[in-house]
Image (cartoon, rainbow, N blue to C red):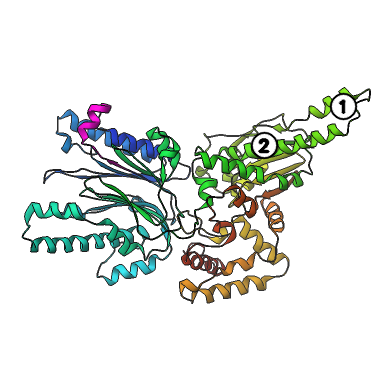
């Protein structure tokens, strides 16, 4: 998400920067710099201040597809150019305003289509009762919120957390508006002065505090009223990230710190993290405050954001990803039997490159220590001392670029075995750098489903004829669903879970699966605040190594000659690497809110009963 509030008159930006589109250009950059893999849609909103009645003051544009940002801004620029060509006043030119909102959609519900693309808009003839809403969130208790909204007499059109939050906040906005209306009417204020008085005195803090206390989930929810108030509210445990920057010209909010640094050309120290439980609020007059709405609770900032989603150009995230690579080295060395000379090291995909650097630095440190000990053992008086010393010093780590993704190939056009054959060729390999008998190590940032490994990567690497293929994951085994903003909600999607189930069946322990199902059903009958994660018992009989070995067996395609081993980061290594973001529920099953326990138990029930698509 991205938000902008211009604090000066529009003419200021034209005089200083040569264009009225200063704010719009910044929004475009904020969105493009946050354009990540897997995003399926985008949308923007704009609010103009002090527009005469009869003129539009809210603009919104949305589009589907990976090219949505470009499509949106191409259309917006055409509309602006057309209005400018006809010499319309700036107040009438669409998308030239003081408030902007942008959103990149990464599905958290499995639902798609324009109806689910942010920002959402609630219309009204009173400017102060219009509401634009977007966010990075997923509510785990949407059923409870839905019941509250319906009990107030509302009739939501769609059952979904964004729709419900929009109506819930919209209703609170209506109530605040009506209260001010009645109060000022009693003072004899009426007509346009009454509308302006209401706009100038809306209290977003009260509106958010009244409604947000009922939300269970991870969220950064952003809103703008038609009269010019703006807010961004973060959950009390900081599960989802939010950062902001402000000076005397502009307020900027975004999901990632380096994006703001780059777009605004400021140092990291100038970009502030929005405190968990707080709302950044900018009123119609442009006054900014950071207001405690929910209170800050235990830190459960999401570690997977740091491993996978956030941009690695952030100074802290870069260090953390390198540390993840370094902390995997002891287990990796066990997998290759400490054979430095006959091992080639690489990474797939490119997002694992930073972890690869950390892994190589960790290996280099250990190799230097090995050389030092070997040198100490040399006899300096021996006739072949120089040759032996040179042989020790010549040992180098063999790092190579093994895989190059062929961006031209598209596997969605094929079905069945034909699709699998195409998937095996999505990457090209570098021939001639792996010798027969070598180990081949490739590091990935995470291994969740394992589909690409089985259909493409392992078969591709085997074409180089290594003795052993070691797949390294810089993150721990993903064992549990997420329910706070990332679409990983089905138990059957996780290769770690499928491996644990197969191990239970192999060892004749079906009763563990049955007992877990019964306990999940029992947990679901309890009040949500009393529930525990009953799915943990599925993993209890096995070590991490047991599950990794079973995964390697399941993911090795027929016909592959190399031995395949999978090495995962430990949870201890995760926390040693990423100290600021301890939220690890994907890996540990320790959910930060009661709703997480409810949803993981429900996910297992759905799996057991064969309702894979139910949520």
Residue at x 60%, y 47% (from the top left corner): 577
Q: Which residues are magenta?
A: 4-18
Q: Which mark is residue 498?
A: none
The answer to which image quadrant residue 72 occupies is: top left
Location of residue 36 in the rendering, given as x and y in whole percent from the top left corner: 46, 42
Q: Position of residue 534 (x, y in %)?
A: 57, 70
Q: Between residue 439 and residue 242, name the one nearer to us.
A: 242
- Picture mark count: 2
Query: Which residue corresponds to the image point at 39% horizontal and 34% vertical from the top-left?
Result: 263
Is residue 10 part of the magenta span, yes or no?
Answer: yes
Q: Secondary structure at mark 2?
A: helix
Density class for disc 1 (Cα within 10 Å; few <14, some 14-19, many ≥20) is some
Residue at numbered disc 1: 388
Percent x, y for residue 172? Answer: 25, 62
Taking the image as shown, residue 283 lies to the left or right of residue 330, namely left
Residue 514 vs residue 233: left or right?
right
Q: Secondary structure at mark 1?
A: helix
Q: Residue at x 55, y 59 (%)?
A: 585
Q: In front here: 204 or 2?
A: 204
Alpha-carbon span between mark 2 and mark 1: 25 Å
Say whether residue 227 is visible.
yes
Mark 2 / mark 1, whichever is N-terminal:
2
Whether residue 396 is situated above or below residue 189 in the rendered picture: above
Residue underneath mark 2: 361
Pointer 2 and pointer 1: residues touching (CB < 8 Å)?
A: no
Q: Is residue 559 visible?
A: no
Categorize mark 2 by other alpha carbons within 10 Å: few (<14), some (14-19), many (20+). some
Residue 248 pos. (x, y %): 29, 37
Seen in the picture, residue 506 relative to 568 is either above or below; the reply is: below
Magenta span includes 364: no
User: Does 193 appear above or below 268?
Assistant: below
Q: Indicate left or right for 344 with 71 as reference.
A: right
């Amino acid at each position: 998400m991205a938000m902008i509030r211009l604090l000066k008159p529009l003419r200021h930006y034209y005089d200083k920067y040569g264009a009225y589109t200063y704010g719009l250009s910044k929004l475009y950059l904020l969105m493009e710099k946050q354009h990540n893999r897997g995003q399926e849609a985008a949308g923007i909103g704009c609010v103009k201040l002090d527009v005469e009645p009869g003129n539009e003051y809210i603009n919104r544009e949305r589009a589907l597809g990976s090219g949505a940002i470009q499509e949106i801004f191409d259309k917006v620029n055409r509309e602006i150019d057309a209005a400018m060509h006809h010499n319309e006043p700036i107040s009438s030119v669409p998308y030239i305003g003081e408030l902007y909102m942008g959103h990149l959609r990464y599905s958290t519900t499995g639902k798609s289509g324009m109806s689910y693309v942010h920002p959402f808009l609630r219309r009204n003839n009173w400017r102060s009762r219009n509401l634009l809403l977007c966010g990075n969130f997923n509510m785990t208790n949407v059923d409870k919120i839905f019941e509250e909204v319906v009990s107030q007499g509302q009739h939501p059109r769609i059952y979904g957390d964004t729709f419900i939050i929009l109506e819930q906040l919209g209703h609170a906005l209506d109530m605040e508006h009506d209260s001010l209306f009645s109060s000022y009417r009693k003072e004899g204020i009426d007509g346009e002065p009454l509308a302006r008085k209401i706009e100038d005195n809306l209290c977003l803090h009260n509106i958010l505090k009244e409604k947000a206390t009922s939300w269970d989930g991870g969220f950064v929810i952003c809103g703008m009223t038609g009269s010019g108030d703006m807010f961004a509210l973060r959950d009390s445990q900081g599960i989802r990230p939010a950062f902001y920057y402000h000076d005397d010209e502009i307020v900027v909010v975004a999901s990632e710190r380096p994006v703001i640094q780059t777009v605004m050309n400021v140092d990291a120290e100038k970009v502030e993290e929005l405190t968990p439980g707080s709302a950044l609020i900018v009123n119609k007059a442009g006054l900014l405050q950071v207001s405690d709405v929910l209170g800050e609770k235990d830190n459960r900032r999401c570690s997977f954001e740091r491993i996978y989603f956030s941009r690695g150009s952030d100074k802290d995230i870069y260090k953390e990803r390198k540390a993840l690579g370094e902390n995997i080295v002891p287990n990796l060395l066990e997998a290759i039997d400490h054979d430095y000379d006959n091992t080639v090291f690489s990474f797939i995909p490119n997002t694992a490159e930073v972890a690869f650097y950390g892994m190589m630095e960790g290996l280099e440190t250990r190799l230097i220590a090995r050389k030092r000990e070997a040198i100490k053992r040399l006899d300096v008086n021996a006739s072949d001392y120089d040759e032996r010393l040179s042989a020790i010093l010549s040992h180098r780590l063999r790092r190579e670029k093994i895989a190059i993704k062929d961006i031209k190939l598209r596997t969605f056009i094929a079905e069945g075995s034909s699709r699998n054959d195409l998937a095996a060729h999505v990457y090209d390999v570098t021939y001639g750098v792996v010798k027969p008998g070598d180990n081949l190590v490739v590091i990935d940032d995470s291994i969740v489903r394992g589909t690409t490994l089985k259909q493409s990567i392992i078969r591709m690497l085997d074409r180089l004829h290594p003795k052993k293929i070691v797949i390294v994951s810089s993150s721990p085994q993903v064992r549990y669903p997420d329910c706070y903003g990332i679409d990983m909600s089905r138990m059957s999607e996780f290769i770690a879970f499928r491996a644990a189930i197969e191990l239970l069946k192999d060892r004749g322990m079906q009763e563990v699966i049955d007992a877990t199902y019964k306990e999940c059903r029992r947990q679901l009958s309890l009040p949500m605040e009393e529930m525990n994660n009953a799915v943990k018992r599925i993993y209890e009989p096995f070590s991490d190594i047991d599950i990794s070995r079973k995964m390697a067996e399941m993911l090795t395609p027929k016909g592959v000659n190399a031995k395949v081993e999978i090495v995962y980061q430990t949870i201890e290594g995760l926390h040693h690497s990423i100290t600021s973001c301890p939220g690890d529920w994907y890996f540990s099953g320790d959910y930060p809110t009661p709703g997480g326990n409810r949803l993981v138990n429900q996910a297992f029930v759905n799996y057991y009963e064969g309702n894979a698509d139910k949520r």
